[in-house]
Amino acid sequence: MAHRPGTVDSPRGVANVFDPLWSALEPVGRDPRTGGYRRFAWTREDHTLREWFAAEAAARGLDLVEDRVGNQWAWWGDPDAAAERGLGGVVTGSHLDSVPDGGAFDGPLGVVSALVAIDLLRAAAAREGWQPARPIGVVNFADEEGARFGVACAGSRLITGALAASKALALTDADGTSLAEALRRAGRDPHALGPDPQALRRVGCFVELHVEQGRALADLDHPVAVGTGIWPHGRWRLDFPGEANHAGTTRLADRHDAMLGYAAAVLTARAAAERHGCLATIGKVAVQPGGVNAIPSGVTGWLDARGADEAAVRATVDQVRDEALRAGATVTEESWTPTTAFDADLARRLRGTLGAAGPKGRPDGIPVLGTGAGHDAGILANAGVSAAMLFVRNPTGVSHSPREWAEPDDCRAGVRALAAVLRDLAGEGA
Ligand code: GLV
Ligand code: MN
Ligand code: MN
């Protein structure tokens, strides 16, 4: 399904390349009833997306390297030689997987924009004799959303060591399939999983372009903003015990109903989030045995908690944990990402580049945003990689939903901004 790259040096410019790439991805994993996407790690859909990425890299003559975890890196230039010189490459990209019934933009916008930005730079190289002094890489991170196995940004957490391979391999999906088994079925060696310092050494800096996931840019006269940081956030699994019995013959006094403790925890999450000024969501639940006429013998809920302040997020989670423990539940922290500050110098430089290309010719006025959404850029930043983000305006302000959107003009502005940033960071070569 690879499309031969069109030429960006045409009257339709960026759209000439962007649109066919976007159209090729559109049908993959799309639920025709809702228009949302189900692209989960190590499934058939994921395989199709990975093949697409590999083919688009090949069509551009980029060298495709997979790290120990299965993240795909497509290189223009030799990143190992650059790493030897202590520089590393300039990397962009994002992810292609989705949440259940997710939008088209979260992830793919960053990957498609990266490929088109490469085409723009290649065109500039041919036209102006410009050559990058540093290699440029495009990455497709594996399992960013954690929709199947529960841990978000699994690909970047694993290569940086933020997630232990032993813990990751034991994670299971809704059908009880472990990540180890899913990898085997996808033709991969689960024993390969683990930190990959060599892959990381190749990354001199990382700039992830992403659709904005709230309304921060919706009413501003700017299609692109610079991301400066990510709120602390985490996921907790709550397992409530109960005893299955007949819904019609078991007296209320004799029941041990797992749903009651779960329901109390959901209400506590909302109240605690309000009290501490945070966000708390229980958006996924599994009920055993799952019969309308059977008392639940077990309920598992997953809590997602985030906020501007780490202590407030912890206080929110503690309150939910106490409520769950009172109902006999076990509470397991599945992931935690502390407050993430992107590289301030890099963010300033991105602002400078965007500003220089803007009407004022200056960085002031280019919006800067922090975000409550998690990203691989945050995981890399916390591992010591110089990282920052670009956000493309989302007029609906909605994300993780089919209503997620970015106007075509804004997508093209994002590509041009990314190309300018890559060109600046990769510098002038002989
Ligand atoms: C990823 O999109 C997250 O913020 O959960
Ligand atoms: Mn997402
Ligand atoms: Mn994303």
Image: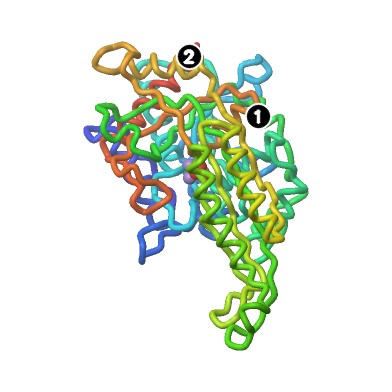
Q: Residue at x 53, y 49 (%)?
A: 50
Q: Which residue is mark 1?
A: 200
| Residue 166, numbered label | none
Residue 195, image x and y in percent? 73, 36
- Can residue 397 be seen in the rendering of this structure? yes
Residue 326 or 92: which is nearer the viewer?
Answer: 326
Q: Quadrant of residue 177?
A: bottom right
Name the outermost residue toward the bottom.
Answer: 249
Give, as a three-letter code, the residue at label 2: Gly
Q: Position of residue 203 (x, y in %)?
A: 60, 26
Mark nearer the N terminus (1 vs 2): 1
Q: Amino acid at mark 1?
A: Leu
- In the image, residue 62 above or below residue 244: above
Left or right: residue 216 compared with residue 271: left
Q: Is residue 338 above or below residue 96?
A: above
Secondary structure of the residue carrying tag 2 is loop
Name the residue rendered at 62%, 19% in the picture.
82
Q: Residue 427: which disc? A: 2
Query: Which corner quadrant of the image does residue 64 belong to?
Result: top right
Residue at mark 1 to residue at mark 2: CA–CA distance: 21 Å
Image point (74%, 45%), residue name: 165
